[in-house]
Amino acid sequence: MIKSWLVATTALAMMTGVAVAQTSSSSTTSTHTTTAVPAPVVGESSSTTTQRTTDDGVVTDKTKTYTKGTTVSPSGDTSTTQRTTNSTTVR
């Protein structure tokens, strides 16, 4: 009787294992990235001024850069950009 019980339990365990082994799942992830095309620069001008001062052996450079540019978007719109950059270097 114990032998029949062990055989039945073993058969049930093997069938369950086979059923689990046949079960599969898959997952797919897809990513799509788009990058906007930068607008072409029609015209750009830039000017830089630098001022150097010395005080008790300490040298200070002050630089100012002014940039102005015009761009055209893909739809034909134009925009003007102005940028001023100030930097100070102390040595």
Image (cartoon, helix red, strand yellow):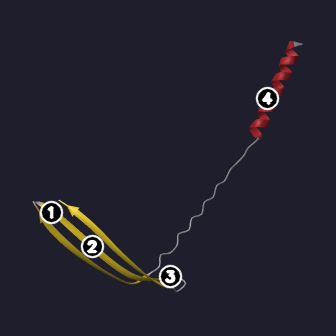
Earlier sequence position, callout 4 versus callout 3: 4
Residue placed under numbered mark 2 in the picture: 64
Residue placed under numbered mark 1 in the picture: 59
Category of crowding for the residue at label 3, using alpha-carbon neighbours closer than 10 angstroms: few (below 14), some (14–19), many (at least 20): few
Query: Which amino acid, by three-letter code, is at mark 2?
Result: Lys
Q: Vertically, is 9 above or below 37?
A: above
Residue lying furthest right in this view?
A: 1
Q: Position of residue 78 (x, y in %)?
A: 48, 85
Check disc 4 and report its element: helix, strand or loop.
Answer: helix
Earlier sequence position, callout 1 versus callout 4: 4
Q: For marks 2 and 4, give the one nearer the viewer.
A: 2
Q: Position of residue 58 (x, y in %)?
A: 14, 60
Residue lying furthest top in this view?
A: 1
Q: Vertically, is 31 above or below 49?
A: above
Q: Vertically, is 7 above or below 65?
A: above
Category of crowding for the residue at label 2, using alpha-carbon neighbours closer than 10 angstroms: few (below 14), some (14–19), many (at least 20): some
Q: Are marks 1 and 3 in contact (CB under 8 Å)?
A: no
Residue placed under numbered mark 3 in the picture: 73
Q: For marks 1 and 3, give the one nearer the viewer.
A: 1
Query: Which amino acid, by three-letter code, is at mark 4?
Result: Met
Q: For marks 4 and 3, give the one nearer the viewer.
A: 3
Q: Which label number is shown at residue 14?
A: 4
Earlier sequence position, callout 1 versus callout 3: 1
Query: Which amino acid, by three-letter code, is at mark 1?
Result: Val
Which residue is rendered at x = 66% and y = 53% of the image?
28
Q: Gap in Å between the C-alphas at discs 1 and 4?
A: 85 Å
